[in-house]
Image (cartoon, grey):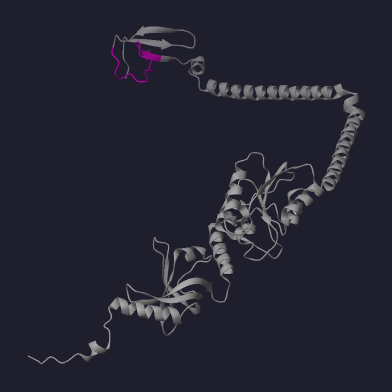
């Protein structure tokens, strides 16, 4: 056996378990690499049923495992995909069960473009492929609505602008206001639900959905997919009036009509009363003039008919028609006579031809026809005859029956 050597290491150092060592490394990493930004390319993105998102951040020389817990992952507006370059903020820690260090992400942004802008572009591309922006499915706005619904905040400038414009242009219209949050947590859900609720109310002719101007973050509720789909499903025509002219939201693209501002929405939804009245007066004038011209034309035609010879002497036409009938009858009679004469001549010719070959005509010249007994076949030879046979002889007039007394050959 080998001699036991004294273990001086045990006397000088404490022996650590794997868990203790891993815990010390974790504490060291968390103190050193806390609240930092990293840049890298995303790969191996996966999200199990827990709702947490796991991914790998890498560059040309290394890779880092990362995790976003459910609450953070649900707050990310854009879709995280493999191959995307991102900026990630968080802290490095150790996942003790695997002895693997990882980055716990608390915030993530696409590199080179804002997170909200990327989310907007991603959703816009997806909904456009589904046909939600198709101009062919957009409903026309009513010319003169009786009831208008407005989905917006009661405290913003947008509702005042819309009401002022509508009341100034056409005050004789019913307005139904559905107050909602237009920014912040839960705003998109309130807007989408309001649109669905208004579709259940009968008699609404058109709907305005919008708010005043603001940053991209302030307007984000109108870029949410739920709002877009509720607008798309609305049976009521929807005017989207979000922000200013330069602000374009998903709601603007899905809506049946986009207003550049809330003020323009008020101008689009109703015509100006004085302009409408002037237009109706002009239409009325044109209708009266058209009717007057039609009456003048009819009067001219009646006067022309009244002064015509046919109107003054109405039986002349009847007499001319009777004369035409007489002429036709006369031509028919003449044609009939001519046809009869032609047929008579043709029949006479046929009778003459028959008479020329008639045996009676031969008999008239002194000839007779002899037949054998009841046989009607003429006897042309003495052969076959016997003395005592009876012969029937036919003359031109009458005939006799004779008995053969002698045969001459």
Q: Is residue 268 above or below residue 363?
A: below
From the top left corner, tell me how far across and down residue 68 is, in percent: 45, 69
Q: Confirm whether the magenta stretch covers residue 377.
A: yes
Looking at the figure, which quarter contains the C terminus? top left
Q: Confirm whether the magenta stretch covers residue 319.
A: no
Give whichever of 191, 245 is nearer the camera: 191
From the top left corner, tell me how far across and down residue 177 is, in percent: 69, 46
Looking at the figure, which quarter contains the N terminus? bottom left
Give whichever of 270, 94 is nearer the camera: 94
Q: Is residue 11 left or right of residue 288?
A: left
Tell me which corner region of the image, top left, top right, bottom left or bottom right, holds residue 57.
Answer: bottom left
Which range is magenta?
370-386
Residue 58 seen in the current view: no
Tell me which corner region of the image, top left, top right, bottom left or bottom right, holds residue 262.
Answer: bottom right
Q: Is residue 34 above or below residue 302?
A: below
Q: Residue furthest front?
A: 11
Tell me which corner region of the image, top left, top right, bottom left or bottom right, holds residue 217.
Answer: bottom right
The residue lying at 61 percent from left, 56 percent from top is: 254
Residue 306 seen in the current view: yes
The residue lying at 41 percent from left, 7 percent from top is: 400
From the top left corner, tell me how far across and down residue 55 is, in percent: 42, 72
**Tally of numbered discs:** 0
Q: Is residue 45 left or right of residue 213?
A: left
Q: Is residue 210 left or right of residue 93?
A: right
From the top left corner, tell me how far across and down residue 264 is, in percent: 75, 56
Give whichever of 201, 353 is nearer the camera: 201
Give whichever of 92, 111 is nearer the camera: 92
The residue lying at 70 percent from left, 62 percent from top is: 213
Q: Is residue 12 left or right of residue 65?
A: left
Name the main secondary structure of what is drawn in magenta.
loop
């Amino acid at each position: 056996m080998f001699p036991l050597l004294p273990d001086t290491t045990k006397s000088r150092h404490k022996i650590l378990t794997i868990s203790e060592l891993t815990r010390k490394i974790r504490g060291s990493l968390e103190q050193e690499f806390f609240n930092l930004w990293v840049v890298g390319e995303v790969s191996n993105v996966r999200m199990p049923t827990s709702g947490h998102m796991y991914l790998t951040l890498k560059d040309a020389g290394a890779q880092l495992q990362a995790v976003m817990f459910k609450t953070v992952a649900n707050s990310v507006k854009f879709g995280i995909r493999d191959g995307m370059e991102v900026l990630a903020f968080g802290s490095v820690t150790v996942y003790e069960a695997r002895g693997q260090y990882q980055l716990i992400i608390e915030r993530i942004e696409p590199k080179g473009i804002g997170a909200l802008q990327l989310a907007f572009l991603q959703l816009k591309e997806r909904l456009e492929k589904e046909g939600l922006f198709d101009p062919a499915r957009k409903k026309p706005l009513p010319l003169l609505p009786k009831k208008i619904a407005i989905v917006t905040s009661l405290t913003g400038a947008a509702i005042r602008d819309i009401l002022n414009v509508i009341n100034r242009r056409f005050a004789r219209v019913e307005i139904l206001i559905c107050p909602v949050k237009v920014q912040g947590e839960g705003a998109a859900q309130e807007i989408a639900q309001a649109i669905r609720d208004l579709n259940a109310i009968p008699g609404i002719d058109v709907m305005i959905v919008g708010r005043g101007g603001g940053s991209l973050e302030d307007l984000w509720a109108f870029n949410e997919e739920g709002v877009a789909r509720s607008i798309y499903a609305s049976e009521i025509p929807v005017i989207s009036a979000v922000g200013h002219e330069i602000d374009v939201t998903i709601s603007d693209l899905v809506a049946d009509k986009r207003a550049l501002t809330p003020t323009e929405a008020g101008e689009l939804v109703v015509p100006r009363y004085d302009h409408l009245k002037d237009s109706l007066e002009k239409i009325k004038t044109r209708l009266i003039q058209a009717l007057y011209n039609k009456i003048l034309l009819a009067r001219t035609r009646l006067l022309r008919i009244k002064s015509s010879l046919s109107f003054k002497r109405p039986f002349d036409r009847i007499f001319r028609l009777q004369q035409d009938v007489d002429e036709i009858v006369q031509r028919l009679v003449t044609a009939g006579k001519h046809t009869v004469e032609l047929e008579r001549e043709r029949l006479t010719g046929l009778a003459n031809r028959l008479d020329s070959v008639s045996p009676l005509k031969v008999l008239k010249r002194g000839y007779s026809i002899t037949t054998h007994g009841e046989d009607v076949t003429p006897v042309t030879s003495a052969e076959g005859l016997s003395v005592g046979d009876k012969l029937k002889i036919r003359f031109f007039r009458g005939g006799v029956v004779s008995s053969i007394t002698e045969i001459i050959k």
